[in-house]
Amino acid sequence: MRFATVSFMALLLLLGSLPLYPGPNTAAIRGKVTYTGTPAKPKLIDMAKQPECIKVNPGGRLTEDVVTGPGNTLQNVLVYISSGDSDPGPPPAVAATFDQRDCRYATHVLPLRVGQNVSISNSDPFNHNVHPLGKINREWNRIQLPGTPPFSYAYENEEFIHVKCNIHAWMSAYFVVLKTSHVSLTKNDGTFRLPDLPPGRYTVTAWHEVYGTQKQEVTLGGGETQTVNFAFRATP
């Protein structure tokens, strides 16, 4: 009985020394990406030389290099921590996925961690050619036949890598290989969020394939959420 009483008292002392709400005292960055000016309008893709693509796109398909949303917002802007992330941790064990479907890349901008596998698949009933144009990393290209299993690849260095298909010239996407795990891609409302950041000073970078790169410096306190907005100058 004495042992149980002592143990209970020790437990009370231990609980009294812990914070009321245990857990990481992390911070976050949120914001929105917009544009000023007049962006180029998406163009209807000419698929006349590839009738197999017309068949799977009976209503046509538009280019995706500039995609806007309501309220002058920009989609497919990659926002990430480019400086200050001192401990990015190991790359995810789960591969990112990259599919070719309806004569387009299902993901237009794909963030990857250095060392993380990307699993590449072909859901179309015809051939595609995957050609990532690496400059710091190795450039390669590979024919992918319909019905074949996905294949995987991992990159060793940070880089923004343009991906194209040598068979269907309009197919375009980007592999964005980064060390940081703090990455967000804007959707059609232009919003982004970078959660789970330790207190500290960071450089937040926003990248768009046409309008370039912008950066802002942010100092975060524990438990704080700061708003950081970006506005790109768009020209037709």
Image (cartoon, helix red, strand yellow):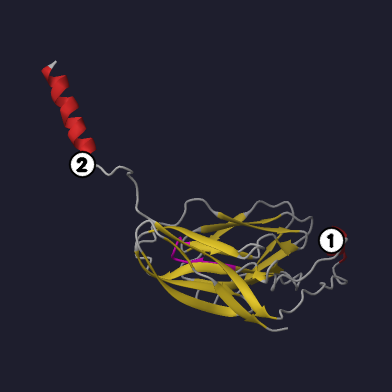
| Residue drawn at (65%, 63%) of the image | 189
* Location of mark 1 (residue): 57
Q: For the residues labelled 2 and 1, say whether their Cβ atoms are less than 8 Å apart.
A: no
Count of numbered labels shown in the rendering: 2
Q: Which residues are magenta?
A: 175-182
Q: Give residue 19's position: percent from left, percent from top.
A: 27, 44
Q: Give residue 179's position: percent from left, percent from top.
A: 44, 65
Residue 139 visible (yes or no): no
| Residue drawn at (53%, 65%) of the image | 31
Quarter of the view holding residue 132: bottom right
User: Closest to the observer: 107 or 103?
Assistant: 107
> What SS does tag 2 mark?
helix
Q: Amino acid at mark 1?
A: Asn
Q: Give residue 73's position: percent from left, percent from top.
A: 65, 69
Gap in angstroms between the C-alphas marked 2 and 1: 64 Å
Q: Vertically, is 10 above or below 231?
A: above
Identify the mark at residue 17; answer none if there is no mark: 2
Residue 216 visible (yes or no): yes
| Residue drawn at (52%, 60%) of the image | 193
Q: Vertically, is 164 above or below 194?
A: below
Q: Which quarter of the rendered picture does the C terminus lie within?
A: bottom right
Identify the mark at residue 106; answer none if there is no mark: none
